[in-house]
Amino acid sequence: MINTRQISIPRIQPIARTKLARYPKIQKFKLPLVLALVHVPLGLLLYRSSMLALAHPLAVLSLGLYFAIRKNEKIERAAYVAAYLVGAEVLWRMGSSPIFWEFGKYAAGAIMITALARRRHWKMPSLPLLYFALLIPASFLTIIGNSLTDARAKLSSNMSGPLLIFVTCWFFSHVRLKGTQLKKLLTLIAVPLISVAVISLFYTVTIEDIQFTNESNWLTSGGFGPNQVSAMLGLGVFVCLASYLLFKTGFRDLLYFGLLSLLFAAQSVLTFSRGGMYNAIGGTLAIVFFQFWDFAPSLKKVVPLIGVSVIFLLLIFPFINDFTGGKLQERFEDTTTTNRVEIIESDFQIFLENPILGTGVGEAKSSRKEFLDLLASSHTEFSRVISEHGSFGILALVALGLATINNFRRQASPVGRALIAGLIVWSTLFMFNAGMRLAAPAFMWGLASVSIVLPHFQRKNAQNTLEMKTKLAKA
């Protein structure tokens, strides 16, 4: 008889788990690399196929709602899909996707509200709620003075952005993310923008005899609005640089984010719309400023950033400038604001004539004809709020500003403060330049409400606190 107790059976490690343990960094880097490669042809396919142009946004929305509805699913998965959706909004518009114009704002909001309701997170942040509530009274003027169809269009166009700010603030006030999770979220915003850059590049190199002038160029913007394309590619630059500057990264990350930021920057300036790069530079400088409070580790990150900037300024920009016959440099040397300052001034004049409730949502455009002798929509969200919502709009902006200050003050780490500053500066510059025509500025502003979990910093803080208590006890 064989005694089975005397037989030792060697333990067999699962192959997949062994490989993951041996090469964890490669495994972690593989997913964003695969996503980037997939989105190179995806943009062109979506641009050519109306069926795919419809299937892609519906699939993204369905996935987001799936994660939101499943109560046992981690809430950050819904946040990831909402982030991807926000990044893909201009891609769907470029591809003439047969979805309604404000789909990006409402779809992202639907995912987040569903996730909150399913998990019974009913508590709303008071200041963002007050901000949106103060904007509602002017809506009644629009409803009274227009047909139902026109009122609905004006309210949807102008109130969907503020609504998304409130919803995103509410959502992220219930979300806690680690540094790796925030890095993943920012990367998912950038991934669909690869398709936007590829479409713009394809259009640029395949169309013969492009005429470059001192104005924004639709042909180098993939046949779509240069302001929106430039702004979103600028967002791509910002989130790539933020991901590298703020979180733990290695050489692969530097290569990945560096190359993507150069691609986004090149295509952004080639649209001849300057806002995208200005927004990206402003947001990045805000991050660098607050990162330098912790000087030694920040310096290691800033040096590669300077290297990427030098490559763009000394190699890529001159090449593109030669391609445009020197017109690109002329465009960026031009300091005119294409009537934006005049429109802002007219908004204040309209406010003085309607100081309490304003003109009503969406009504400033027709009122502006008295002052500028032209029908022009506001490019600046803050002046639009003042002219169309009156004193209630001013109070709403104050409430939003106070909420932002609270979010900044409760951040305990330099990384948290730098991220909040970068998000708010980028969103503010976007709304000064392009209003709230896209979901991105509202989502990025609301993201500033997130709670950032940094175990290393928390351990260091706890240790410092313990040392301080020990010294006090000895004293």
Image: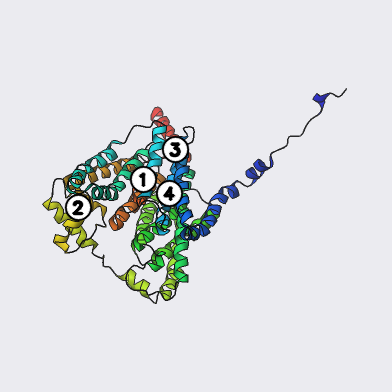
Question: Which kind of residue does numbered mark 3 sit on?
Answer: Ala
Determine whether label 3 and label 2 are within 8 Å by CB: no
Determine whether label 4 and label 3 are within 8 Å by CB: no
Question: Which kind of residue does numbered mark 1 sit on?
Answer: Tyr
| Mark 1 or mark 2, earlier in chain | 1
On the image, numbered disc 1 is attached to which residue?
A: 106
Q: Residue furthest right?
A: 1
Numbered label attached to residue 68: 3
State how far apart marks 1 and 4 are (Cα).
Answer: 11 Å
| Mark 4 or mark 2, earlier in chain | 4
Q: In the structure shown, which secondary structural element does the residue marked by tag 4 occupy?
A: helix
| Mark 3 or mark 1, earlier in chain | 3
Residue span colored magenta: 119-123
On the image, numbered disc 2 is attached to which residue?
A: 363
Q: Quadrant of the C terminus?
A: top left
On the image, numbered disc 4 is attached to which residue?
A: 85
* Residue 35 x/y as whole percent: 53, 52
The residue carrying pointer 1 sits among few (fewer than 14), some (14 to 19) or many (20 or more) residues within 10 Å by Cα, namely some
Return the residue nearer the eye: 267 or 70.
70
Any magenta on residue 420? no
State how far apart marks 3 and 1 are (Cα).
Answer: 15 Å
The residue carrying pointer 3 sits among few (fewer than 14), some (14 to 19) or many (20 or more) residues within 10 Å by Cα, namely many
Q: In the structure shown, which secondary structural element does the residue marked by tag 3 occupy?
A: helix
Identify the residue at horizontal 16%, vertical 56% (top origin). 367
The residue carrying pointer 4 sits among few (fewer than 14), some (14 to 19) or many (20 or more) residues within 10 Å by Cα, namely many
Identify the residue at horizontal 39%, vertical 58% (top origin). 234
Most prominent secondary structure in the magenta stretch?
loop
Return the residue nearer the eye: 59 or 427.
59
* Residue 253 x/y as whole percent: 52, 54
Question: Which kind of residue does numbered mark 4 sit on?
Answer: Leu
